[in-house]
Image (cartoon, grey):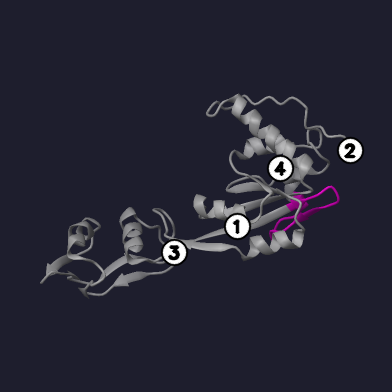
Amino acid sequence: MPKSKRDRPVTLSKTKKKGKEHKEVIVNSIRNAVENYKSIYVFSFENMRNLKFKEFREQIKPSRFFLGSNKVMQVALGRSVSDETQPGLHKVSKFLCGNTGLFLTNMPKEEVETLFNKYEDYDFARTGSTATEKVELPEGPLEQFTHEMEPFLRKQGMPVRLNKGVVELVSDFVVCEEGKPLSPESARILRLLGIKMATFKLHLICRWSAEDFELYREGLDESDVESA
């Protein structure tokens, strides 16, 4: 294996939110991990949930995950042939954009692919998320709610009243429309109804090793690396 260039000094001065020292710690952590793991993956994520992601990470220890500033992760790997820390790592760097992270491991690639491709978990959608279906409540009693909930439901825009201690809708009510963003009120009502519309997923984008480089996402090829 060629001599590592991870000890090359790096200047990180564009932003000051977390400080130069914090960024340098991240850079050094990634470069140390590059030395200790044979494969590096870039992955993207949908509907990130920190607790669920932590549970996923526990399944595949002692591998390493890195999330955070894409620019800092790019610096750690190298953004061009001239400053990459290992041959070919600049290709990985180019795919760190948007909601992405790094995964470094010694696991066989087939096992990694299976874990990522099969993993998904459902959760309640948050404000601004796109509704995956139309939810409409018909006029009549809402027996799943206690009478104490009636004022709160009215504040969410639901046309409700108490009828002999039972919460009821005085007319049909559309909670959300498929394909449209959820309002704060819609998100709260869906949670009360127990309807989960968010799916937390992880998608592999590419894999690097000292021997080869592989793309997983359709519609991408290595020409994107040069033009990114």
Residue placed under numbered mark 4 in the picture: 93
Residue 197 got which mark?
A: 3
Disc 2 marks which residue? 2
At mark 1, the secondary structure is: strand
Q: Marks 2 and 4, how far apart in space?
A: 19 Å
Query: What amino acid is labelled 3 in the image?
Result: Met
Point out the tag, 2 or 3, that comes first from the N-terminus.
2
User: Who comes first in sequence, dot 1 or dot 2?
Assistant: 2
How far apart marks 1 and 2 lie (CA) works out to 32 Å
Q: Is residue 83 above or below residue 89?
A: above
Is residue 48 rendered to the left or right of residue 44?
left
Spot occupied by residue 113 in the image (x, y as percentages of width and height): 70, 61
Q: Are marks 1 and 4 in contact (CB under 8 Å)?
A: no
- Point out the frontmost of discs 3 and 4: 3
Residue at image position (58%, 40%) is 68
Question: What residue sits right under mark 1 in the picture?
Answer: 202
Q: Position of residue 28 (x, y in %)?
A: 70, 32
